[in-house]
Amino acid sequence: MKTNMTRNELKVFLLHAPQDKVLEYLENAHPVDILDILKEDEKNDCLDILNRLPENFIAEIIDEAEDEDKYKILMSFSDNKQKNILQEMSSDEVTDLLGILEKDQADRILQKMTTDDARNVRRLLSYEPDTAAGIMATEFVAIKGDMTVEQTLKYLQKTGEDIENIDDLYVVDKFDKLIGVVALKDLVVKSFDTHIMDIINPNVMPIPSNMDQEEVGHKFEKYGSLTMPVVDNFSRLLGIVTVDDVMQILRDESTEDIHRLGGVDEGEKISGTTMESVRSRLPWLVVNLFTAILASAVVGVFQGTIEKVVALATLMPIVTGMGGNAGTQTLTVIVRGLALDELNYENEKRVLFKEVGIGTVTGVVIGLIIGIMSFIWQGNAMLGVVMALAMILNMVVATVTGYLVPLILKKLKADPALASSIFVTTFTDCCGFFFFLGLATVFMRFLI
Amino acid sequence: MKTNMTRNELKVFLLHAPQDKVLEYLENAHPVDILDILKEDEKNDCLDILNRLPENFIAEIIDEAEDEDKYKILMSFSDNKQKNILQEMSSDEVTDLLGILEKDQADRILQKMTTDDARNVRRLLSYEPDTAAGIMATEFVAIKGDMTVEQTLKYLQKTGEDIENIDDLYVVDKFDKLIGVVALKDLVVKSFDTHIMDIINPNVMPIPSNMDQEEVGHKFEKYGSLTMPVVDNFSRLLGIVTVDDVMQILRDESTEDIHRLGGVDEGEKISGTTMESVRSRLPWLVVNLFTAILASAVVGVFQGTIEKVVALATLMPIVTGMGGNAGTQTLTVIVRGLALDELNYENEKRVLFKEVGIGTVTGVVIGLIIGIMSFIWQGNAMLGVVMALAMILNMVVATVTGYLVPLILKKLKADPALASSIFVTTFTDCCGFFFFLGLATVFMRFLI
């Protein structure tokens, strides 16, 4: 095993070692490592390094690069070299590259491709981008049932080098309809004269071409496949989706949920500029401002009560703060449960009753603690009672709201993570102020 | 392709169809589908269905089941049948099963295994559970460099059926030291007489046996491997980790982060009981209660100021609320950036300056809006100025705090997601009250 070079040593090696040594190293190098070097480098060195790389390797680098960078990397080369690079890329990789370009930019690139390749890619571009058909590759191995293991291996030796993924060999009939699959690892353990039909797995799970990409990802998570076949309405095999494409989709989905729960646009990146982040966060902050004003309006209604017992102003943020925390806890569990498909029709009711129970128990515990502390602080028993009651009420409201809001959003086909926290915290704030100051107003004569 | 049965039809089929038909169906069925049926069933039917399944299939079901259920399923069978099932399971699957049992329960099961298998599993159990060695399997294919493709295929035909994962064939020297790897898909496209040493990839990335499992997952995400080799200090091959094990780990890691950000214990499940959830959330709520009291104490210091201008009580929740929102936004982006390794030494400073900039710009915008609205509401220009100033100050404090807290926690080797939000919101609440009521006190003569 070669000793791994540090990033700087690798950069020097790529820039200055003889070309044949570089090619030998690259035969087994991983494009991600080279991409890391390119990312953090000044422009001149980048171009020098890129010009020393063979075209198939450049194709792999473009595949691993961020969407915004793919076009830039391709454009660093001459037209002729671009043609060769495009030929090395698989159809879904080219589709990724073209998917974010303007139409004329994309057309110029398509013109540099062979007629067949361009036609494949145009077809892929015609699909909705975030669906199975939008993320699939059209290079796959399709074999017939009457072939033997030896014939299949010989076929792979002839054609397999150009096909990116041969983990699963899909079996089709004479009309190109999918009838089953043979995993490569199941093929190689059988004797050479075994027929495909004897080892075929007919229970293959075809993915409709219009399935949402995140749903495709969940199927991979559930069934642990390496690839899954995409079919059209007539069960004809259109292409395949692979597990590594899907890992990126699942990671982006988690990031999206986490960002949305925190009130941040899912596209915001650490690497973005200040103004990009401002544009991402400001709309949310403005919305929050107006809901905060709404909650403050509730306080304004009871300004007379606060004038009489100013200690209420000191205590009221505790009630709303705890309501917000409890609501966020419920919200977090519910939203994640919806995303992982653990919350569904079968357990909906049980979970609702559970949240009511949680709100009640935690409300009583917290209410008792703060009620007693308020009593001690001001020496007024009624203040403690008002505090405890308001706390219990608000925490039950919080857990129920934290349950209902994401579920309602989901039933309205909206993303539960997106606006849930704003609705939940606004509602619990308003209720918290209302319960606390309202109870204080009702029992005012005991508080003065 | 067989038509898929509904879950109820499948249950009836499994219970009542002739045994040979059931076996034929199971040859290509997925254990997850059978597991779904078992999960929602009453106990009697479960046992009947389990007793009709062949032992290798039961082994796969145990592997797919939740940790708490694995033991229960195994124990539904006679001792003899348990022995056979254990023989069908791979070493990492048995390790998962035993990992959560008491020592005497685990020993009783180990006694039912063959001496070799038991020794393998005892060794795996001796490793830290959440490390590479703790999650690896010891069944893998190791070949020598002087073999040909044809010899390798014949070897696979002889031994491959018992080995769960043959996607990557690891090449070792005569001392069992890892010298490289040949992917199965690279093997099958070469002619039969090719030597292994001619197609070996020497740049294999070995994983040290004590690497944290989440770090292992990130390596899979970054390099798109199907399997990765685990080695000891002498580079000897100990076992392999596979991508499907890692997908579960990565999903659990995202759930953990999401739960911690929301103040929920990472183990809390939708399927848990009310009291389990109360126990998960109550500690966090009590901590939040005391930090809320801390913030209220700041208000208490300025009670005299509020007595003079009661409108301040109506406005102050807006300042702290916006601080909390801004702090949470920053926190979300920073925590996720740390988890995805996008925030590191190289861009630390730039991101800090960026957050200061974001806090300033958004603070000015929000401050202007609410300052003007406060002025209009009470007809007092100084109130508007105080509001605007407090808002700007608090939002800069919020973004900086949202940046510093997770980073400090990370440098102290604690989980940034865990306690960040409590520290951030407490600090921004205290500062918000302090700035707003403090400025109001200083400029009191203009406010009355």
Image (cartoon, coloured by chain):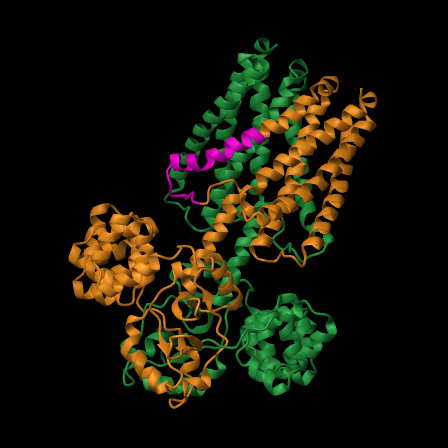
Chain colours: A orange, B green
Q: Is residue A201 magenta?
A: no
Q: Quadrant of residue B59?
A: bottom right
Q: Quadrant of the N terminus of chain A?
A: bottom left
Q: Quadrant of residue A435?
A: top right
At horizontal 43% and vertical 32% (from top left) the residue drawn is B358
Q: Position of residue B101 (x, y in %)?
A: 66, 69
Q: Position of residue B165 (x, y in %)?
A: 46, 75
- Start and end of the magenta stretch? A267-291
Which residue is more in the foreground, B84 or B416? Answer: B84
Q: Position of residue A170 (x, y in %)?
A: 40, 75
In this rendering, the answer to whether A448 lies above or below A42 is above
Q: Is most of the magenta stretch helix, strand or loop?
A: helix
In this rendering, the answer to whether B393 lies above or below A44 is above
Which residue is more in the foreground, B192 or A351? Answer: A351
Left or right: B28 as drawn, with respect to B302: left
In this rendering, the answer to whether B153 lies above or below A5 is below
Asked whether residue B328 appears in the rendered view, the answer is: yes
Q: Is residue A268 magenta?
A: yes
In this rendering, the answer to whether A326 lies above or below A296 is below
Left or right: B228 as drawn, with respect to B39: left
At horizontal 45% and vertical 86% (from top left) the residue drawn is A198
